[in-house]
Amino acid sequence: MTVKTDVPRLLGFSRRMSEASLRGSWYGIDLGAIRHNYRELRSHLPSRVKVYACLKRNGYGCGAASVAAALASEGVHAFAVASLLDAIAIRNEGIKRPILLYPGALPDIAPAVEALDLTVTVSSMEELNLWRGAMRKIHAFIKVDLGFFRAGATPLEAARLTAFATACPNVNVEGIYAHMSELPLAAPSDADDQFLRMRAVLAQLENQGIRPPIAMMSSTEGVIEHPHMDLDAVDPGALLVGLPETNVQRRQMRLRPALKTIGSHLVAVKRLDASLGRVPAGLGFHDGMVLGVIGIGWGDGFPRKVPRGATALVRGQRVPILPPAHLEHMRVDLTDVPGARFGDPVILLGNEGDHEITLNEIASLWGTDAVGLYGSLRDHMPRIYT
Ligand SMILES: *Cc1c(COP(=O)(O)O)cnc(C)c1O
């Protein structure tokens, strides 16, 4: 969550300056990119297809509240999150659109679900009955597992569960959905098989005269690769923060990454001298080196072990990050940047002068991929929105 404090205002700081200064480090998030990605998605979707913007994991680290506000102003239909905290953050922005809770919530949060007017996910009779016992009126989506082997009723159970829930007077079945996704080593036909299973569940319900208002199964990969699987709604997440998640682009979307910058500052600068004793070997330290300390560490999402070849940008120059990483600090070698001063910005991701450290560069350095990098963003870090 973004830092909220009146201290900077009392001190006469601008919000932009204060948030980065308070913590020393920040994420630069481009809400314009998120709006652009949403419009790009919308331009490919038939107008009847609704978008449930998936903002789980605090909006993929970009801040669920601010991302939701940007998307609400673009006219998005609804949101989907896994954590009640993300739902609270969205409602705290004054956003009234539907919010679907993915599996993760237990019925003991029923009072919050009612107060915030959230829609819960139901994957079994047991879940349905527990929610029914905890709330007067339930808004629910039934979840189907189409072969991802995660939450959701089996296709066989899903039809029965949906029919039963539809007949319950205190249950409003708003929709039925699945997370169409692929396990490692999936065959190319798996997506089609999942689509057929979804259609079979819907057909079985239709035979009983039941059609939940919304059927949904495509997230980022599905919506880009399989346009015929749009159904009534789609719930992409990665796409909105600029990650296509697939190389097969049946729908050609020009997406822009929302995460622009991971920045910090030099919180100490000094030239090493003999009074420190012997320079430690094997860590990249050397005699006469100018050592910089940056105000970001593994507690801020940087890998616990400094990856070989990790660099940062200081005054437009690349400098090595030296191991080991600490909870809140790391070291850089500033010997080749004679102008470096206490307080200078340090860029771990983004542009500085003529240099750029790209998302893919740090993702691979950190041993992950772009979406894994977004997932490792920490909620305590201030976010500067542009
Ligand atoms: C994560 C998730 C999504 C969004 O997936 P992306 O690949 O980020 O688009 C959609 N639906 C469910 C149920 C999810 O868990």
Image (spheres, rainbow, N blue to C red):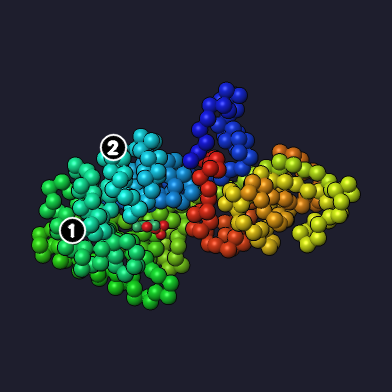
The answer to whether residue 377 shows anywhere in this view is: yes
- CA separation, marks 2 and 1? 25 Å
Q: Is residue 166 above or below residue 295?
A: below
**Secondary structure category for the residue under label 2:** helix
Report the residue at 38% width, 48% height from top.
83
Name the residue rendered at 84%, 55% in the picture: 279
Q: Quadrant of ligand 1?
A: bottom left
Q: Which amino acid does the dot numbered 1 rest on? A: Thr
Q: Nearer the viewer, residue 354 or 76?
A: 76
Q: Position of residue 103 (x, y in %)?
A: 33, 55
When asked about the image quadrant of residue 323, the answer is bottom right
- Mark on residue 162? 1
Q: Residue at x 29, y 65 (%)?
A: 145
* Left-right relation of 141 to 294: left
- Residue corresponding to mark 2: 115
- In the rendered image, residue 385, in percent from the top left (x then y), is placed at 52, 40
Is 316 placed left or right of 191 in the picture?
right
